[in-house]
Amino acid sequence: MSSNPGGGAPDPSMRPTSLSVLVVAGLAAAAVGWLLLSAFYTQMPRLPWLPIIVLGTLAVVEAILAQNTAARIQHRSGSPRVDPLAVARFAVLAKASSLAGALFAGFSAGLLAWLALEPTKAARDDVPAAVAGVVAALALVVAALWLERSCRVPEQPDQKDGGKPDRQGRRT
């Protein structure tokens, strides 16, 4: 938790999503996917397509939101003003989606690795769904990271020099 240097209340902030956290989550999910499939594949139905469609749709929606939000925050011509509360909600959505996408991508990759080594026809029939799961989940991660980046407030020109404002608000 970060604190205000003046000794006041804590400074609320949200840190950017760490790529290392996403990679570790994906690797852990891949291991779980491999272990679950190796233990229960014979009792499972075919891999479903609905989660893949949902992840792909979320990726498209978040990519559109990212493009729209970036244009509004950067005040591009013809773009309406941005609602700060909506941007905060988009940032939270992006952080949650990037982690969920990394988990699903890892899980699907673990399934895919196991299916690739299994010599049965049923396993070969499930490979397209596993590949599509990895692709859709990675698309969601990319779109979510783009949306998160689009929610950042751009640096003001007078803040780039690092000067601090005096009592009248002038930069020193």
Image (cartoon, grey):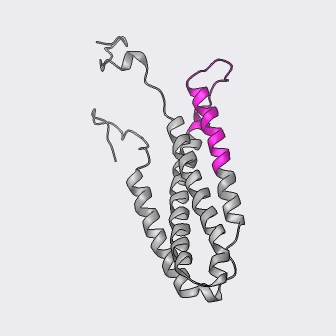
Residue 46: % across, % down? 69, 78
> Residue 30 or 6: which is nearer the viewer?
30
Question: Residue 83 placed where, x, y %?
Answer: 62, 31
Q: How many marks?
A: 0
**Could you tell me which quadrant the C terminus lies in?**
top left
The answer to which of 132 and 107 lies nearer the viewer is 132
Question: Percent x, y for residue 41?
Answer: 60, 85
Q: In the image, is residue 129 above or below residue 1?
A: below
Determine the residue positioned at 42% across, 41% down.
13
Q: Is residue 97 visible?
A: no
Name the side, left or right, on which 136 lies relative to 166.
right
Answer whether residue 154 is visible to the viewer in this image.
Answer: yes
Q: Position of residue 5 (x, y in %)?
A: 27, 34
Q: Kindly identify the residue that appears in the image at 58 percent across and 86 percent down.
A: 40
> In the rendered view, would you say 4 is above or below 51?
above
Q: Is residue 76 magenta?
A: yes
The image quadrant of residue 162 is: top left
Q: Main secondary structure of the magenta part?
A: helix
Q: Nearer the viewer, residue 7 or 155?
A: 155
Vertical comparison of 4 with 39: above or below: above
- Asked whether 54 falls inside the magenta stretch, the response is no
Residue extent of the magenta highlight: 59-87
Q: What residue sits 60% from the left and 27% below the top?
A: 71
Quadrant of residue 22 within the rendered picture: bottom left
Which residue corresponds to the image point at 52% horizontal and 75% vertical from the top-left?
33
